[in-house]
Image: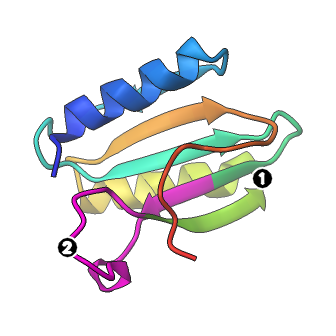
Amino acid sequence: MFRTDLWVSAFVRRHNDIGHMCVVTRRGDPIAGQIFVEVDHLNGEVSLYTPAPATSRLDDTESRLFQLRLDHVEPLKVRERIEREQDFDPDLWVVSLELRSGDIGIDVPG
């Protein structure tokens, strides 16, 4: 699997290159930190994507898989969830993306 810092750098660059505002709001372990993706829908609602459980993998793919943890909720709920996770996992990365709609650019098993 790619290093976390490289994956995050590519994700942020790709979104900024296509005109979406995307920033790293928390840096964690550069090699193996977990990544949370916070999506601000620019309407007062936020969604949160977190790493999918290992059981979600159907093959030996190297790609990172995510799951939708909170969908179109108030920002405080997402902040609280991230803060609880940071207490448990200090190596956590958080990437914040502003996107009204469209492809987030992550793999979410369906």
Q: Is residue 19 left or right of residue 60?
A: right
Does the segment drawn in magenta span residue 83? no
Vertically, is 78 above or below 23? below
Q: Which one is in front, 11 or 83?
A: 11
Q: Residue at x 42, y 31 (%)?
A: 11
Amino acid at the residue labelled 2:
Asp
Mark sitting on residue 17: none
Does the segment drawn in magenta span residue 58? yes
Which label's residue is closer to the chain start, 1 or 2? 2
Dot 2 falls on a residue whose secondary structure is: loop
- Mark 2 lies on residue: 60
Question: Can you give x and y, in whole percent of width and height, for residue 19 in the image?
Answer: 67, 15
Amino acid at the residue labelled 1:
Glu
Q: Residue at x 27, y 63 (%)?
A: 88
Write the start and end of the magenta stretch as one range: 48-65
Number of numbered discs on residues: 2
